[in-house]
Amino acid sequence: MILETTQQVYGKVALIGLGLIASSMFWAMKRRGVAGSVSGYARSEATRDTARRIGLCDVVCDTAIAAVADADLVVLAVPVGAMGAVAQQIGPHLKPGCTVTDVGSVKKTVIEAVAPHLPQGVHFVPGHPLAGTEHSGPESGFATLFDNRWSLLVPVEGTDPAALDRLRLYWERLGANVDVMDAEHHDLVLAVTSHTPHLIAYTMVGVADDLGRVTDSEVIKYSAAGFRDFTRIAASDPTMWRDVFLNNKEATLEILGRFTEELFALQRAIRTGDGDHLHDYFTRTRAIRRGIIDAGQDTDAPDFGRTKLER
Ligand code: NAP
């Protein structure tokens, strides 16, 4: 049930980058009056025009510098590889005492890229909402994206506890549950839960595409749940995911190494007819799925209730 009461946490919020995540944040802020006003900036005129047309942000600025003027919270919502350059540009124009956060899917390299550009007296509290879809751009956002999803805050050395608490409250009012962890741990957890699975999906769809040259129509026509789910993940934004892998190299390679070992073990079980191994393995993985449903992070509806959940 959506509350209609005002729950303002920041006076002015500036969104830098106006894609899926920033636009969802805007609609979620509007839903509960979490910000007094919201300014936005995107690098291309086309995106800024779209934002103005659909009423995304109270004001859309033609420069990032204009957008951050007098902002109490500045959200960097651009691809991970672009965070440093954006921070460098806005750094000298930030209001003293404001908080800068980001929504990047990788934390260690983003912190290294952004922190040096922020002046004394500006609070840096990196973050990462664990919510998204395979869609991107200003028109893909929706107010409920963060509802009951986790948003991770990753404070840096010397982060002001009051700034951290306020950002926590902000995310809670956007509908999310909040946890706090350090950057290295974040990057390892995400390599397991998101980054490596995406790489596997990209690979599987690539393999099918190669086969598709022989039986093109069959791959599409008989696209059943397993493959269809992979294609959805593999449709995610190429720039975003290129940056994720280039920036979470260590943890992704570590998890991929373990994945390859397990894959070889299953391959051997198939070759040697070791059904017990396969059965035990699949029983263990089924329990993990049950745990995710019990934790409220997916639904048990057939096909994951997908059509109702995503838009
Ligand atoms: P998106 O929909 O593709 O939007 C990206 C925005 O960044 C656009 O406004 C784009 O501007 C701008 N941008 C792209 N390259 C840029 C550059 N080199 N310099 C300055 N601005 C640039 O992306 P998104 O899905 O919202 O993702 C934004 C951030 O959230 C990323 O860091 C991503 O890792 C993180 N994230 C994504 C998800 C997800 O599922 N999508 C989930 C959690 C976190 P133009 O439109 O003008 O090109």
Image: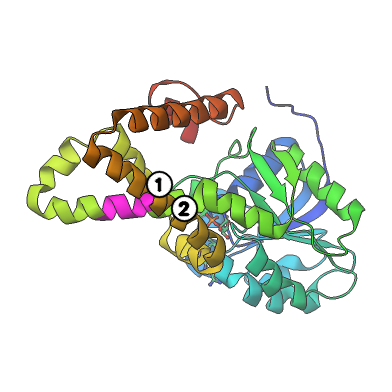
Q: Is residue 222 above or below residue 70?
A: above
Q: Is residue 52 left or right of residue 61?
A: left
- Give the CA separation, mark 1 to mark 2: 6 Å
Mark 2 residue type:
Arg
Q: Is residue 204 magenta?
A: yes
Circle 2 crowding by C-alpha within 10 Å: few under 14, some 14–19, many from 20: few
Q: Is residue 28 magenta?
A: no
Residue visible at 74% across and 43% down in the picture: 179
- Residue extent of the magenta highlight: 200-206
Q: Which of 281/6 is in front? A: 281
Residue 104 seen in the current view: yes
Mark 1 residue type:
Glu
Q: Which of 221/225 is in front? A: 225
Q: Residue furthest left?
A: 214
Residue visible at 37% across and 44% down in the picture: 232
Circle 1 crowding by C-alpha within 10 Å: few under 14, some 14–19, many from 20: few
Q: Which numbered dot is residue 38? A: none
Q: Which numbered dot is residue 262? A: 1
Q: Is residue 297 above or below residue 260?
A: above
Helix, strand or loop for disc 1: helix
Give x and y (percent) for residue 72. 83, 59
Residue visible at 79% across and 74% down in the picture: 118
Q: Quadrant of the N terminus?
A: top right
The reply to whether the C-beta atoms of the residues labelled 1 and 2 are less than 8 Å apart is yes
Q: Which of 25/134 is in front? A: 134
Image quarter for ligand 1:
bottom right
Give x and y (percent) for residue 217. 11, 43
Q: Which residue is mark 2?
A: 258
